[in-house]
Amino acid sequence: MTFLETILGEILQLFKREGIEANSEADIIQKLDIRQSTYHELFQNKQDMVLQVIRFDIDQQNHKQQELLKTAKNPVEEIMLLLVDGIKTIKDINPVFITDLQSYPDAWQASLENLANNNQQVNAEILNRGVLEGYFRRDINLQLVTKIILEQFFMMINPAVFPPDKYDLAEVFRSIYLYYVRGICTDQGGKMAEEFFTKNNL
């Protein structure tokens, strides 16, 4: 890992723990224990720093996703693993981070584009294989279902719909996705999903 990647990783953890606006650039420099000149060599301003942190997070998440999917035995388990990982990821993030991120248009757009492009493509591939292998219902509209999965995520992170001070985002995530996935499964896929729920105490 390069020096920049190490710094980006440390800032990312700080953001996920405390939110973006909780610390000024001066606070971040102090917590990173680096020189101000070093910071300004790496980042033009806070907007640039946030954008670089989010791009780093996207790369890390996508790599982690690929490695996670390699451990699945079938498409149902792939979807379930992604959902469980999503629940864990959201539990580990201060909801303020997501709210703060929306104040940085470039970084927010990069995050949304990754969801729309990478995540939608991954879900479509899994669902398609699942239909062919008999785990998901043949009558589902793949394009529509992948779109619904994505839009449900946008709804979930919208503070106007689910204010984080009123709702546990991890529980919202579980309620939206786990029951939806069960509904698109065949009897065979549904039994696998139920076994996965029981085994993982969901």
Image: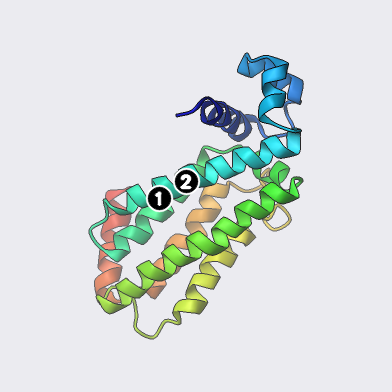
Considering every residue shown, the one lying at the far front of the view is 41
Q: Coloured how?
A: rainbow
Residue 59 in view of the camera:
yes
- Nearest the viewer among 38 and 191 is 38
Badge 2: residue crowd in 10 Å (few <14, some 14–19, many ≥20): few
Relative to 33, is 201 above or below? Answer: below
Q: Residues within 10 Å of mark 1 (few under 14, many from 20)?
A: some
Type of residue at label 2? Gln
Horizontal side, residue 179 vs residue 38: left or right:
left
Q: Is residue 65 shown left or right of residue 113?
A: left
**Of 196 and 86, the residue lying toward us:** 86
* Three-letter code for the amino acid on which mark 1 is drawn: Gln
Mark number displayed over residue 32: none
Residue holding disc 1: 65
Q: Which residue is mark 2?
A: 61
Give the percent coordinates (x, y) of residue 12: 58, 33
> Residue at 37% across / 51% down in the picture?
66
Q: CA distance from mark 2 to mark 1?
A: 6 Å
**Percent x, y of residue 58:** 53, 47
Q: Measuring 62% from the left and 18% from the top, which residue is drawn there? A: 32
Q: Say left or right for 16 vs 80.
A: right
- In the displayed structure, 143 sits above or below 202; it is below
- SS class, disc 1: helix
Labelled pair 2, 1 in contact (Cβ < 8 Å) = yes
Percent position of residue 144, x then y: 51, 78
Q: Furthest residue to the bottom?
A: 139
